[in-house]
Image (spheres, coloured by chain):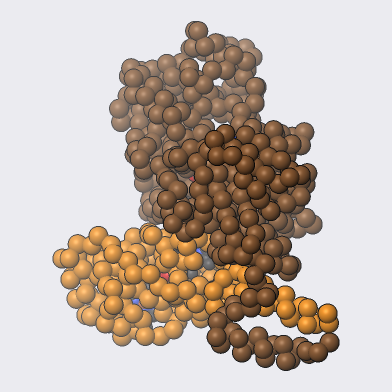
């Protein structure tokens, strides 16, 4: 068989072997992405409190992984992990996880907290970028609706803390969150976590 | 040569529109293959699941001797009283529902030439490829060792219950001794997390008691972080005695309950003695081990260096820089499944990538971790330079609490990955 044809054939076989459509079918993307499941759930569909990463947009995933890698985003562990991958691998993972679907979650959320959070979401102007229910309108902002409360709360505290690194894209939130106390942040997290649009 | 590359690719694109992987003649090879996985722990359960993912038509049989799997990860929290045995108990219904043929039976031997696995009660099971993930067994490095008197609790299950009962029965003021094993062993931070968890129990229930770690080593995993945590939460409760400081337990006396070191004898109220380790008994009886007691493999695919078409993953295998951990076993199971899929379908395996993280809980609100990302370098699994490493020393309470939250999250997610 012609060598080029042989390699084309094996490429297709290979692409088909390791998963479903699009990026998920690229075996080198799968092999680098599958191990993340230990912390982020199967194909990114976390059971909490580590964040769900399935179905986040590729541009956001690619840029936030680079922010972790370059110590521009505070993390307990992702900074240490992201440094293990080169740009091509980070892009492959961004493609892989963006082609998975977001799993709906049902978290145990206090309704009063969620109502308080909803009011803050509106009054503080978060909905301008994150939509009325936390389904963000721009591809560079991640979905908040249904994300885990524990992660969201920690994330907002990290954004608010002037001693912690923050990506330029999130700078706007530092000033918006600086006037909020821990209880407000917990309420916002409860609101987002309770949404399931 | 009747078809050039472009027309082939057009053909590929055309059929992709119908069904992404609609190449029956190319992929049907995977439909007839039989793969047997021995051992339904962190390595084996992962391999079984991902083999079916990658080779949906294959026959995948998992042979595991116990109906219930008790996870070692979070078994220290059972000793500490924060988790119950039910919290660490898992079954195989999830894997069966995905199409894995689950056989609860003990493997008694393998006919490597005839490619058949023998079981105690379920006859012989033929295979094309065999994956072995039997975990660990113990060496005879401690004279007079008796696991009923000095439970190791290094395989979760009845041993965990036994040690917990001994701790509960102990009078306030009693001394607990934890004899930590020499390298290499399953879960390098495990003994030190256990010390913290037992100390957590003592602090709240037996405040006059003490725990002494009797070590066969002079340093250990995440040492700075553990010592910092002991000082912060268990000052005066936990003491670490290194090998150089006569910490190494050489013998035990089951009648008197004594531990013997080079220069001394001790009679603790409760002794948790963890012997040195080697690959699971099955691995050596199948001839898969080398002089080190562990199984050499091709670290790209996990195929045994001794027998072809036999793969060894998890604690039992020699995996370069990867520690013997549940996360390592899980990551290896995925690489091994991808390698077998590549072999079955006749293409070259993509470059593997491996991950490990070990979380440890010092208290329910104080978590620490060590992480690494690995790749293949000159045939050996090596950590990617500049990546991974430890949680920082002197971190805030808020950070430690977040890590404790993510440690529990890890357990939920990885056990879902294993058992569905
Ligand atoms: C106290 C403790 C805490 C730990 N904490 C962590 C942690 O926080 N994070 C982490 O990543 N790792 C942790 N580990 C390590 C982890 O438990 C092991 O690395 C992991 O279980 C290895 O997986 P495995 O598949 O090699 O072996 P195992 O999980 O032990 O599975 C082996 C299986 O094979 C079966 N088997 C053996 N022989 C036969 C036979 N002949 N026939 C049929 N079945 C057979 C056994 O019954 C068993 O179910 C911890 C370990 C301990 C002891």
On screen, residue A77 versus residue B402, left or right, reads right
State which chain is coloured orange.
Answer: A
How many numbered markers are drawn?
Answer: 0
Vertical relation: B407 (above or below) B141: below
For the C terminus of chain A, give its image quadrant: bottom left
Q: Residue at x 36, y 81 (%)?
A: A136
Q: Quick one: which residue is furthest to the top in this view? A: B256
**In terms of depth relative to the viewer, which is nearer, B95 or B334?**
B95
Residue drawn at x 59%, y 44% as measured from the top left: B38
Residue A152 point in image, percent of width and height:
35, 66
Q: Is residue B232 visible?
A: no
Name which residue lies at 46% across and 28% down: B159
Q: Whole-percent x and y of residue B123? A: 59, 39
- Relative to B95, is B29 on the left or the right? right
Q: Position of residue A44 (x, y in %)?
A: 46, 66
Q: Nearer the viewer, residue B214 or B329?
A: B329
Relative vertical location of residue B401 with respect to residue B216 in this rendering, above or below: below
Q: Residue furthest left?
A: A112
Residue B293, by quadrant, is top right
Q: Is residue A151 left or right of residue B177?
A: left
Quadrant location of the N terminus of chain A in the rendered image: bottom right
Using the image, determine if residue B222 lies above or below residue B272.
below
Chain coloured brown in the rendered structure: B
Q: Is residue B5 visible?
A: yes
Give B171 or B153, whichever is nearer the viewer: B153
For the point 41% across and 25% down, which residue is it?
B162
Nearer to the camera, B211 or B20: B20
Quadrant where ligand 1 appears: top right
Q: Position of residue B160 (x, y in %)?
A: 43, 30
């Amino acid at each position: 068989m012609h060598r080029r044809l042989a390699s084309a054939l094996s490429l297709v076989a290979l692409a088909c072997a390791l998963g479903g459509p699009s990026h998920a079918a690229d075996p080198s993307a799968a092999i680098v992405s599958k191990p993340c499941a230990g912390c982020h759930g199967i194909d990114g569909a976390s059971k909490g409190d580590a964040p769900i990463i399935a179905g986040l947009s590729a541009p956001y995933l690619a840029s936030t992984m680079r922010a972790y890698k370059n110590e521009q985003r505070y993390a307990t562990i992702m900074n240490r992990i992201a440094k293990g991958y080169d740009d091509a691998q980070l892009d492959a993972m961004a493609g892989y996880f963006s082609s998975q679907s977001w799993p709906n979650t049902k978290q145990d959320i206090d309704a009063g907290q969620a109502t308080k959070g909803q009011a803050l979401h509106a009054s503080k102007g978060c909905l301008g970028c994150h939509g009325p229910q936390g389904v963000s309108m721009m591809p560079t902002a991640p979905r908040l609706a249904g994300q885990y409360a524990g992660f969201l709360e920690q994330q907002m505290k990290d954004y608010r803390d002037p001693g912690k690194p923050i990506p330029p894209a999130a700078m706007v939130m530092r000033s918006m969150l600086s006037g909020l106390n821990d209880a407000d942040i917990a309420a916002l997290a409860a609101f987002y976590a309770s949404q399931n649009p | 040569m009747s078809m050039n590359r472009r027309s082939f690719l057009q053909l590929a694109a055309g059929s992709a529109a119908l069904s992404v992987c609609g190449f029956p003649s190319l992929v049907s090879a995977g439909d007839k293959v039989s793969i047997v996985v021995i051992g339904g722990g962190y390595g084996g359960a992962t391999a079984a699941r991902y083999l079916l993912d990658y080779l949906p038509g294959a026959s995948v049989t998992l042979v595991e001797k116990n109906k219930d799997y008790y996870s070692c990860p979070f078994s220290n929290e059972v000793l500490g009283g924060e988790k119950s045995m039910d919290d660490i108990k898992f079954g195989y219904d999830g894997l069966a529902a995905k199409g894995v043929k689950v056989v609860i039976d003990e493997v008694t031997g393998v006919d490597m030439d005839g490619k058949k696995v023998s079981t105690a009660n379920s006859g012989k099971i033929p295979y094309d490829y065999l994956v072995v993930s039997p975990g660990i067994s113990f060496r005879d490095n401690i004279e007079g060792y008796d696991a009923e008197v000095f439970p190791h609790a290094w395989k979760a299950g009845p041993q965990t219950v036994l040690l917990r009962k001994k701790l509960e029965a102990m009078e306030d003021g009693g001394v607990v001794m934890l004899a930590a094993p020499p390298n290499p062993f399953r879960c390098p931070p495990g003994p030190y997390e256990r010390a913290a968890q037992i100390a957590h129990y003592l602090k709240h229930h037996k405040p006059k008691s003490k725990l002494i770690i009797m070590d066969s080593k002079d340093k250990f995993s995440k040492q700075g972080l553990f010592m910092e945590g002991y000082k912060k939460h268990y000052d005066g409760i936990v003491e670490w005695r290194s090998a150089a400081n006569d910490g190494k337990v050489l013998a035990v006396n089951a009648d008197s309950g004594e531990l013997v070191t080079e220069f001394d004898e001790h009679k603790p109220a409760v002794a948790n003695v963890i012997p040195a380790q080697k690959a699971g008994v099955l691995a050596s009886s199948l001839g898969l081990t080398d002089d080190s007691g562990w199984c050499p493999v091709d670290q790209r695919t996990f195929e045994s260096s001794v027998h072809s078409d036999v793969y060894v993953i998890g604690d039992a295998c020699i995996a370069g820089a990867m520690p013997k951990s549940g996360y390592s076993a899980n990551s290896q199971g995925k690489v091994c499944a991808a390698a077998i899929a590549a072999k079955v379908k006749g293409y070259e395996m993509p470059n593997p990538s491996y991950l490990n993280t070990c979380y440890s809980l010092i208290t329910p609100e104080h978590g620490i971790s060590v992480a690494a990302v690995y790749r293949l370098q000159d045939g050996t699994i090596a950590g990617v330079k500049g990546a991974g490493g430890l949680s920082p020393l002197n971190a805030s309470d808020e950070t430690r609490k977040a890590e404790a939250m993510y440690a529990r999250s890890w357990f939920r997610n990885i056990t879902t990955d294993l058992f569905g």
